[in-house]
Image (spheres, coloured by chain):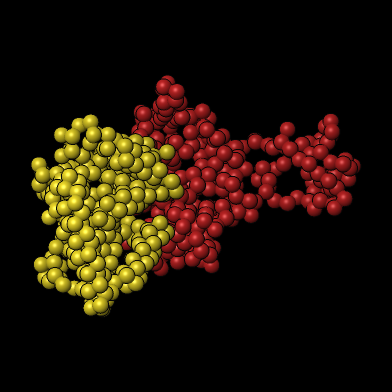
Chain colours: A yellow, B red
Amino acid sequence: MKRLLSVEFRRYAARRTVRATGVLAFLAILIATVIVVINSDRSMAAVRDSARERQRLIAECEEAAQTHPVEFQNAGDCEGFFPRESFDPRFHLTALEDVLEGLSFLFVILAMGLGATFIGAEWNAGTVTTILTWEPRRVRILAAKVLAGASFVFVAVMTVQALLVAFMAPVALLRGSTAGVDGAWLGDVAEIAARSALIGALAAVIGMSVASIARNTAAALIVAFVYFAVIENVLRGVRPNWVRWLPGDNMALFVIGSEGTGIREISELRAFITVALYSTVFFIGALGVFRSRDVT
Amino acid sequence: MAVIEVEGLRKEYVRVRRLRRRRTLAVDELDLSVPEGGVFGFLGPNGSGKTTTIRCLLGLIRPSAGEVRLLGADSTRDLASVIRRVGAIVEAPALYPGFSGRHNLELLARVDGIGSSAVQERLEQVDLAERADDRVKTYSLGMRQRLGIAAALLRDPEVLILDEPANGLDPAGIKEVRDLVRRLGSEGRTVFVSSHILSEVRQMCDHVAILARGRTVKTGTVHDVLAGETRSVFVRVDDLAKARAVLAGARMVTTDVEGGLRVEIDPDKASEPVARRPRSLRIRASRR
């Protein structure tokens, strides 16, 4: 099993799709870093100008609230309309928490797509036949592929997030602000990154399982798209009570918490267990189909 | 001892098309016994059930009925216990096109803990060492076939199962594969090779089983089974007298038929050149 896992891991790492995705992710991080470098300004003059601009807008808002009391029922909200962070020209490293939470959705989609290509490409190239003439125990084969794929995605998502933090930290140090960055913050960021990677790995398991059942990458991607873009949205609208069971909502809840999603009825742990259960069901289904179907 | 034993093998495919279940009988009560050592030919026309039988042998598909044993192990249950002693190519060798030939072999070798020296050795054995680091998708069909054979040989197997290894190859490629198979068979391995070409089996194999419509119709040594088989080709030429003279010089038996000549060919020398065609003589040959 160890050897099979090592072979699969190496195969995934050598795939062009994986390398291209890695290069694109690196470029995206690089571009984001350049944009932040250009936009971030920690000079006192810039900070003062921005603060002054904010004060001016708040004053205008409060004045308008007094002259048009119907539209502005809560004049005190003016401070809230113009949040301090939005008028700070400095890049705050602490903002990365929100960035990572926002990126988790992208990671889930990429993980599912990569997972689907890992298995779909094997069927497309016919290499499933070749590997079965080396190791005929199908459960071991698929288990190794899925386990290696999920681990690969976990490591990849963690690496991308670590790179993002590694690129942004010097920018914050030199041109922005590291206020609020301490051990607790680092712990929070690590937790968000790990949760994203874990959900990515589970999404990859679903992608690989669907591709294994359909014996096709495209079929798996279409199923994922139709489910997440259409079915889940329809269910959310028609049956609001089902939200607690929908994979997409549970994934989001596990990564960004109940405050971010507005789902308060279920805990983050339960959300994770629900997603893990869905992945397991898909995986067991794929194992059953792979064991029983002819490889022609 | 028989290395491959098949008893009453039956395989029926069920496919659903336009909401209707369609059954296709690919193999019907097939019996087969392959002795140890040498090259065994599995001869039959396309669609006669050769690949289906091989897939059953390798556990890729489940038989509808019957028993299939490879090196004494039941292919549907205990294949894992003997698979290390078997090398196989089913139809065209399926390898990762984006990886190099060497990388493909290394990945397979790793599954069994085989070292990279064995990979290099096999690449040299099939004359692919020079192109080993090129991507498989840049290989010709013959090179892919040879790479597939190298993959099948990685484990130094006792039994080699090759499904139509010369399929789609040019004459030079066919000769290379044929020589390689003969060499492997003479090394003491059992080579089980399927083909739909009679002359190929005649030249490569020691034993043969002839398959038709999913059943074995004849089995035995190549000499016994294919004895008395003669082949002839119909040759249309623009200069009948000159052609007759050339062929007579090569001691070929010819008969005049309408529009050309019928030339009898000794099956054992079918692939050897018998005469040089004069430049001025234009020939069109066909089996008729």
Q: Tell me residue A284's x, y (percent).
A: 23, 40
Q: Where is A155 relative to A222, above or below? A: below
**Left or right of A73 in this view: A221:** right
Q: Tell me residue A181's x, y (percent).
A: 15, 71
**Left or right of A5 in this view: B12:** right
Q: Residue furthest front?
A: A67
Q: Which of B166 and A76 lies nearest the eye of the viewer?
A: A76
Q: Tell me residue B236's x, y (percent).
A: 81, 38
Image point (57%, 45%), residue name? B167
Q: Where is A47 relative to A218, above or below? A: below
Quarter of the image with the N terminus of chain B in it:
top left
Residue B85 visible, this angle:
yes
Residue A147 visible, this angle:
no
Image point (36%, 44%), residue name? A221
Quarter of the image with the C terminus of chain B in it:
top right
Q: Which of B36 and A51 lies nearest the eye of the viewer?
A: A51
**Left or right of B235 in this view: A208:** left
Q: Tell me residue B274's x, y (percent).
A: 75, 50
Q: Which of A131 and A257 lies nearest the eye of the viewer?
A: A257
Instruction: Please tell me in which quadrant of the rendered image residue A18 appears.
Output: bottom left
Image point (10%, 44%), residue name? A264
